[in-house]
């Protein structure tokens, strides 16, 4: 069975804000607007939003300005309603004890990043998120891990939800069927990055994986709201919330129809996207004065844990891995002289690679051991 390419799976981590064309800023910097672009006064808007059971603050994960906006939005909401909890897409459910220790002031930043295995669990620059985490701890707000393991989402995309045993589902229930508009958007995303010869079921499993991901986060938000009575401010990718698809749709199915979606609005985002449904409110950002986080090195493989170690499930066309001659089915033995026992071992080594460097990799193919060299392009 063919597997989804790695790039398509990575899109699950954050469906980016769409910007098919460049247009003049339609929401002036520093201004709140409704979903049609009509200017809103800050105080009445935030007062209304602060009363909602759940507020979803969308982001593009690699944009520092989005995270600065999230912090200021959180602070504004907290000033109006101090009885809040902060939910993070970045952290899986299993790390909740660690998040509880953080909120209670029980560990420092370095220890938190080490024990959470931030670089492998999430990967984006922790400096983007630590101000939000420090704000939550300073005010002793509960911090809730909304996510599930990436391996679960990848498995659903490969095999389907029905193939995952109950014991491996991390407590996630069956999601509400996605809306037709959400399905169409996901299919467009997949079509832009998928192989033309992918089996028909690949698209349905991709949609199913995204729906499970949305459901998992919605369940944690709903459970936190019901258990604590607090308003939950969720920090998550904009693709999980835009158009009230994704998480808002699943929240409504869970009995919380009145969540609020707030988004940062980049200066170059098309005004046509302000269709009245994209969000409850947007905040205008000025032209970016700094680049997004530099792209991290990518080998271009999907890794599958196996009883005998780690195997390559698929190789992305035109990738570093393809040029090196790596192939689906290869069992990884070592990289840069270090043994590969789990997918995170290879991920950590690859992300340390500088542009223009070569990475020696040893694989087992059939009965033979083979050495290859992955050559990362120079910037």
Image (spheres, rainbow, N blue to C red):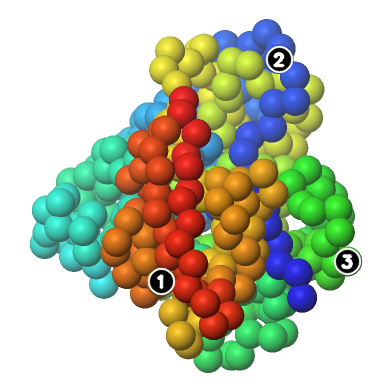
Label 1, secondary structure: give it.
strand
Tell me, yes or no, if residue 209 can be seen here. no
Q: Nearer the viewer, residue 14 or 361?
A: 361
Alpha carbons under labels 3 and 1: distance apart: 33 Å
93 with respect to 190 (left or right): left
| Rendered-image quadrant of the N terminus | bottom right
Q: Which residue is mark 3?
A: 200
Q: Which residue is mark 1?
A: 333
- Residue 14: % across, % down: 57, 47
- Residue 18: % across, % down: 69, 32
Of marks 2 and 3, the one in the foreground: 3
Of labels 1 and 2, earlier in sequence is 2
Q: Residue at x 36, y 43 (%)?
A: 353
Q: Residue at x 85, y 67 (%)?
A: 199
Q: Nearer the viewer, residue 321 or 276?
A: 321
Q: Residue at x 74, y 46 (%)?
A: 193
């Amino acid at each position: 069975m063919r597997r989804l390419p790695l790039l398509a799976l990575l899109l699950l981590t954050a469906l980016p804000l769409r910007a098919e064309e460049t247009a003049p800023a339609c929401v002036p910097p520093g201004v709140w607007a409704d979903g049609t672009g009509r200017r809103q006064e800050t105080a009445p808007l935030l007062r209304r939003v602060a009363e909602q059971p759940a507020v979803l603050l969308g982001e593009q994960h690699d944009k520092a300005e989005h995270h600065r906006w999230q912090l200021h939005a959180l602070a504004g909401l907290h000033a109006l309603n101090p009885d809040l909890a902060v939910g993070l897409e970045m952290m899986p459910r299993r790390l909740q004890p660690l998040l509880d220790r953080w909120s209670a002031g029980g560990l420092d930043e370095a220890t938190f990043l080490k024990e959470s295995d931030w670089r492998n669990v999430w990967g984006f620059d922790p400096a983007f998120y630590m101000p939000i985490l420090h704000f939550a701890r300073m005010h002793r707000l509960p911090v809730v891990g909304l996510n599930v393991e990436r391996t679960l989402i990848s498995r659903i995309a490969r095999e389907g939800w029905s193939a995952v045993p109950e014991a491996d589902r991390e407590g996630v229930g069956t999601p509400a069927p996605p809306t037709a508009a959400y399905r169409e958007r996901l299919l467009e995303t997949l079509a832009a990055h998928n192989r033309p010869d992918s089996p028909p079921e690949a698209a349905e499993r991709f949609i199913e994986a995204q729906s499970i991901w949305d459901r998992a986060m919605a369940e944690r938000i709903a459970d936190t709201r019901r258990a604590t009575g607090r308003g939950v401010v969720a920090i998550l990718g904009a693709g999980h919330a835009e158009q009230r698809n994704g998480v808002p749709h699943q929240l409504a199915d869970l009995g919380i129809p009145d969540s609020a979606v707030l988004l940062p609005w980049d200066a170059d985002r098309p005004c046509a996207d302000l269709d009245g449904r994209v969000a409850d409110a947007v905040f205008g950002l000025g032209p970016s004065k700094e680049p997004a986080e530099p792209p991290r090195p990518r080998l271009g493989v999907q890794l599958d844990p196996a009883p005998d170690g780690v195997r390559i499930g698929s190789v992305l066309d035109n990738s570093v891995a393809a040029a090196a001659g790596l192939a689906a089915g290869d069992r990884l033995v070592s990289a840069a002289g270090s043994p590969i026992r789990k997918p995170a071992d290879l991920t950590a080594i690859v992300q340390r690679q500088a542009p223009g460097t070569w990475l020696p990799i040893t694989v087992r193919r059939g009965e033979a051991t083979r050495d290859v060299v992955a050559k990362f392009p120079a910037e």
